Image (spheres, helix red, strand yellow):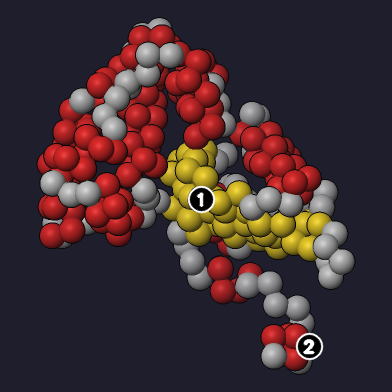
């Protein structure tokens, strides 16, 4: 049924026009060299470009300042080399326009009929901003406020479930509905957001900021910060200061 349908189409279906209407989703298809072959308009805008042709045939390092472009290429290379899907990776995107936003990124390999990997397809969906006036959010409010007030205590999913008077499963399900994130992902987002503000607004050491957001191990903090932002805390601070001065 599916092959018959696609064989009848006048041109290959990529989903490009569909994703052009989804302004909170970045969509792309890349070849086995990691070059863009299909992009949606949201990605064009966030790269600070006007036309899709400005992206086609280019790799992320040609469009995004280092080391951010390198991070995305490393992801691509892993997917292309391993054939394994990257699923719902929580990360902070920072574009040349200086627009930032939390996204959940998924990348999947594209294969020929014999299994050879010929490219990949990916989406990055913006993490939604919750409506705090809904009943769904109010059921989570105590747990959320507790986590925000005690970032240095390394609040766990179990801690939040206890405060919310829910099981871990019930809490996770409600967090997904309200934030589009698991509870664990939301806690990571909270910690990285607080760390960013400390790096921007204070001259505290990296070790002190790690403690401020609940990490007793600075290397663990650095590793998670870099996984989320593509920059080490030191690189992030330097980039922020350079951007402000310019």
Q: Mark on residue 88? A: 1
Q: Nearer the N terminus, badge 2 or badge 1?
A: 2
Task: Residue 129: give x, y in percent of width and height.
Answer: 31, 52
Would you identify the image quadrant in which residue 154 lies?
top left
For this view, does 222 lie left or right of residue 141? Answer: right
Q: Nearer the viewer, residue 110 or 113?
A: 113
**Neighbour tally class for label 1: few under 14, some 14-19, many 20 plus, Cα within 10 Å:** some
Q: Residue tagged by mark 2?
A: 7
Circle 2 — which element? helix
- Label 2, label 1: how far apart the Cα atoms are: 32 Å
Would you identify the image quadrant in which residue 158 lies?
top left
For this view, does 17 lie left or right of residue 221? Answer: right
Task: Residue 44: give x, y in percent of width and height.
Answer: 61, 55
User: Could you tell me which residue is drawn at 72 percent across and 57 percent down?
Assistant: 109
Against 179, residue 147 (above or below) is above
Q: Nearer the viewer, residue 114 or 233?
A: 114
């Amino acid at each position: 049924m599916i092959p018959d349908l696609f064989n009848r189409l006048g041109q290959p279906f990529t989903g490009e026009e569909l994703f052009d209407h989804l302004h909170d989703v970045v969509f792309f298809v890349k070849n086995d060299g990691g070059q863009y072959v299909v992009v949606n308009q949201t990605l064009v805008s966030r790269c600070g470009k006007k036309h899709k042709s400005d992206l086609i045939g280019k790799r992320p390092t040609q469009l995004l300042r280092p080391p951010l472009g390198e991070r995305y290429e490393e992801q691509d290379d892993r997917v292309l080399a391993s054939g394994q899907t990257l699923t719902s990776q929580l990360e902070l995107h920072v574009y040349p326009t200086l627009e930032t936003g939390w996204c959940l990124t998924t990348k999947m390999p594209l294969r020929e009929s014999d299994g050879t990997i010929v490219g990949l397809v990916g989406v990055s969906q913006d993490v939604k901003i919750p409506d705090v006036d809904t009943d769904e959010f109010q059921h989570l409010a105590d747990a959320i406020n507790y986590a925000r007030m005690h970032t240095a205590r390394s609040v766990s999913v179990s801690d939040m479930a206890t405060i919310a008077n829910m099981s871990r499963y019930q809490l996770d399900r409600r967090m997904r509905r309200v934030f589009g994130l698991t509870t664990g992902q939301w806690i990571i987002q909270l910690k990285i957001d607080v760390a960013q503000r400390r790096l921007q607004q204070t001259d505290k050491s990296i070790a002190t900021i790690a403690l401020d957001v609940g990490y007793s191990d600075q290397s663990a903090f650095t590793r998670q910060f870099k996984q989320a932002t593509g920059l080490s805390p030191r690189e992030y601070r330097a980039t922020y200061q350079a951007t402000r001065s310019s």
